[in-house]
Amino acid sequence: MERYDRQLRLWGSHGQKWINKANICIVASQCALFQEILKNLTLTGVSKFTWLHTGEIDHDPLFYKDLAKGLTNLNTTVVDIRAQNIDYSDSAFDWKEYTTMVVVNANNKQWLENILKRTDAEMPPIICTYTKGLFGYSYTKLFVPHFVLESHPEHKIPDLGFQAPWPELSSFMSSFDISLLSSLQLSQLPYAVLLYKMLQYVKDQGVEAPSNRDIKAALNDYYLGEVNSDGFNDLNYLQAQQHSHLSTRKQTFDDLEDAISCNNKLLQSNSRRHSLMDDTFSCLLCSLGIYLDENDRNLPIDPNIPDMESDSTIYHKLKLIYQNKWQEDLRKFENIVAANFPALYRDTNLDIKGAIRLFFLHSREIKCINPNEIRLFENDGVSHPIFRQLINSQFEMGRSFESELIERAFKLTSYPTESYMGGLVAQETIKLITHQFEPIDNAFIYDGLTNNAVTLKV
Amino acid sequence: MARQSNIVRIVGNDSYEKLRSTKCLLVGAGGIGSELLKDLILMEFGEIHIVDLDTIDLSNLNRQFLFRQRDIKQPKSTTAVKAVQHFNNSKLVPYQGNIMDSTQFPLHWFGQFDVIFNALDNLAARRYVNKMSQFLSTPLLESGTAGFDGYIQPIIPGKTECFDCTKKETPKTFPVCTIRSTPSQPIHCIVWAKNFLFNQLFNAETNPNLNEEDEEENKDWGTTDLDEINRIRQETNELQELQNIVVSQQENRIHEIIEKLFVHDINKLLLIENLWKTRTEPTPLDITNIQNVSDEPSKKLNLSEIWTINDQVQQLVHVTKKLMKRMPKEQNHIEFDKDDQDTLEFVATTANIRSHIFNIPIKSVFDIKQIAGNIIPAIATTNAIVAGLSSLISLRVLNLLKYAPIKSPTDLNMAFTAKASNLSTNRYLSNPKLAPSSCNCPVCSKVVRGVVSVSSTKYASLTLQNLVDLIKDKYEYTDEISVLDTKNQRLLADFDFDDLLNKTLNDINLTDGTVIMFTDEDEDENGLCHKPLELYLDITETLPTGLDIRLPELEIPLVKAITSEEATAEEEEELSVEKNLTEENIIVLDEEEPSTKKRKIELEDEQAAKKTKSEVEDVIELD
């Protein structure tokens, strides 16, 4: 795994495992963009490709004259590229065995339109891409919802779980008799304790759910007014002020709820993709739904509480309480999986315990990207001028350029555009394969003339 | 050929000739470098010089597509050039060397290039190349990646912000006491193991006494507790004894080392009661853990898992034996290297045992490797994206896209890319316009920079007075001019010091590569004077015939007068910043640490990228 060390740190060895297992179908001619995408995917660890050759002769500058030779040893296994000429009339082609499909610079509009308009749930996600001159686009078509299991948000809001305190937490909190502590001892309490005590105080005053705005004032009244009037400069008090919103925050997980109900519908209608990965995650999502039903829709506690200014013994105790609670939640979840999906739970082909653990740990990050209606080829489907222009150019549907400048920039070949789009399309493919990081939903347009890029939904 | 006709279509016939005669310098043949080299070749740049000091490592191969398993340990620059031959149509010149080595790469060597591409992985080299580009007014395309994040920044000297105009985050450091007596996070224990313990035991050149005394004056102890300070000093001395065990290879005494570090030293710390009033007391390692160590070779442990404390101790004994055996072969001098499994496991196990003692969570070897080696995630796709951006914008920087000329350098864009296609702005790529160089950055704005080229015959007779006269004539400086050697802030001449004026430059040790600063001391009626001028002295044989000295064509603006004291103070400030950076005694969390090479300061790329990013783009900041 040493070879993949630098990327394992982004998506973990479980992410890498799905990359190594992926089977990608690429529809392309021997062009620069195709080579760039293939090179990037191979480097990342994909080694199984089907190349449906579209036959046109391209004059692109290429860095692999002999593709198979060029890709040799670019990853740890033998790169297996099954090349065959595309048969546009073959309606029986078996798409479902592919993890993802990439369609590069296709020019057969009828064929592409038919593929994109298919309704069978077994179709893999398709990324269509096209570059011309200084411009390029990529468009991701989903046929069933795509579940992102680890979206790796930039910022995570900590959850102290005060909305549903459990016995260990409550008894820990009540072990501090605030009125008996000296101001030194008070200054050594983690801010979570101050916030918890403040909430109790507010409740005693008859206020059930103070608003975010009131909460700061309440903390002020309670702590400085009732407990420790000298504490206004203490670091723990300042942190409590700063994080006061955490005390009443009811974390909502619309994305997760959406994913669960989506998945349940798919399970009922059985209109979904069947693969080891899809089946596994489908079962886990369904189990998570059951877990939430049984737990008042409270998500598993977040085992990693933020750093707090505090006496280190107290902080460690607090941390342990969260971690133990999480372990307990995890056991509950495991039991649900075992009871509802015994076959999966006993499957020895995959590290199911590890998968359950990771899934549960990242359950707050789950997102569901819904399939989109394809309107790419309709006249009003795409309003972005460069996007429109690219589609017109791709399928030779007439040309009316906004300006002479853009017209010139369209007629060029620009290797940097291929490199850029090749990187982007491979990156989107990796997101889909690993079910980590949010893919672009659903179109991306690159304009090298202004070095501008937009994502939009069509 | 077909490819050529396509390129002509990109830039047009005139520009194609210009493109073919363009000389590029590519600094770095790693992740971005491999991609850039390919792009520049396929764009048909005439000549590309590639500099890299590194050799190829296994962990490069997930993205540096020009290299294969068989190339491991080979120099990157030459291997890259060999690997591109089959599609190459440019003149390629590889160098294996450090770009900051002014003997191998003097300024006039930089002077041959029309454009410089930075594809570097460390802050020091980035700043250095930035400075060279400022002296020579050569456009620089700066770039970097960290995981899914990447950026490019075109730098047009004198016209747009330079690399140093935006503040870069400096490496994180910790007070001595946190590391040595009161750790509270895994990182503290890792720093202790890597920067302190490892060196003390396996680097026999380290003389603890000397070090301590040298740094005594300005050491950041992070505590004023005398007991604590004394204990830290004493402990360092005691470690000398442990080093002797290692050097003399007394395997049977390894348990003594462990006992000393994790039992006796902890007990001594416990005696300093002040430390434990608000902290949890550490618990010395259970002695049975040490006694239980078997002579059996340890079982196969999973590097991604968290080992038990018994396994940690067992593995520590095992790896210490291995390192001891290596000592004589390696001149009693082993350096920590994240890719050297023995050194990594030594650091990981000792850090973890210490964490265990201080009630800090222990970590897997995989995770410790990331922290101790300052590993930054790196993937092929981001590199391809950034190289594409950088190579495309170079055409515009060189004004080779005639149909889309730039009116002003500030019309150029920088670009940031992120996995966060779904950032608040919903952009995959953000592209702020470049800012003009109007900040107070010491590199590009305080002074005007240029190169004075002198032939060696002329140099032999050139006096300081001659040079001053030439400068006055050329740039219309007044008579009141002060001259400074910037290397050591040595005053060479001013209105009441003219002793050196009649000496030759050689007499007063102004040699090739010296940077001389000229300051106008006389303000006009509006309180304005010429901006200070820094000239890099370049002794060269490449001047056109008939010319023995050449001053740069510069326009020196009038600015509000500043006193020479102020100017000197600024310069010193700059120097002292650099000094701090290079002499940091506890270095932590830099960027990826180069294997076995001594490079001390570097900054985590990611942080640099993020820092700049947050300055130009609204990123949601929590709390």
Image (cartoon, rainbow, N blue to C red):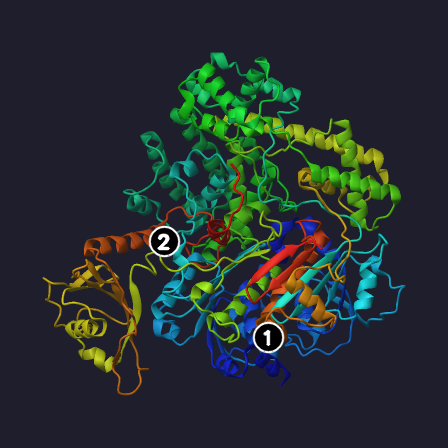
Q: Residue furthest right?
A: A92
* Relative to B441, B473 lies left or right: left
Q: Which quadrant is home to the N terminus of chain A? A: bottom right
Residue A117's image quarter?
Answer: bottom right
Whether A66 is drawn above or below A220: the answer is: below
Q: Any mark on residue B582, and which? A: 2
Q: Position of residue A144 (x, y in %)?
A: 80, 50
The chain identifier of the residue carrying mark 1 reads A
Label 2 and label 1 in one chain: no
Label 2 to label 1, Cα distance in Å?
51 Å
The quadrant in which the C terminus of chain A is found is bottom right
Residue, disc 1:
A408
Q: Say if residue B218 shows up in the picture.
A: yes
Q: Which chain contains the residue that carries disc 2?
A: B
Asked whether residue B74 appears in the rendered view, the answer is no
In the image, residue A329 above or below residue B409: above
Mark 1 closeness class: few <14, some 14–19, many ≥20 residues within 10 Å: some
Residue density around tag 2, few if under 14, some if 14–19, many if 20 or more, within 10 Å: some
Task: Kindly state the secondary structure of the residue where label 2 is placed.
Answer: helix
Asked whether the residues under the numbered discs 2 and 1 touch, taking CB atoms below 8 Å apart as contact, a structural biologist would say: no
Residue under the point 86% across and 48% down: A271
Q: Amino acid at mark 1?
A: Arg
Of all residues, the one furthest to the bottom in this rendering is B545
Q: Position of residue B616 (x, y in %)?
A: 48, 52
Which residue corresponds to the image point at 64% horizontal and 43% vertical from the top-left? B305
- Of circles 2 and 1, the one toward us is 1
**Amino acid type of the residue tagged 2 in the rendering:** Thr
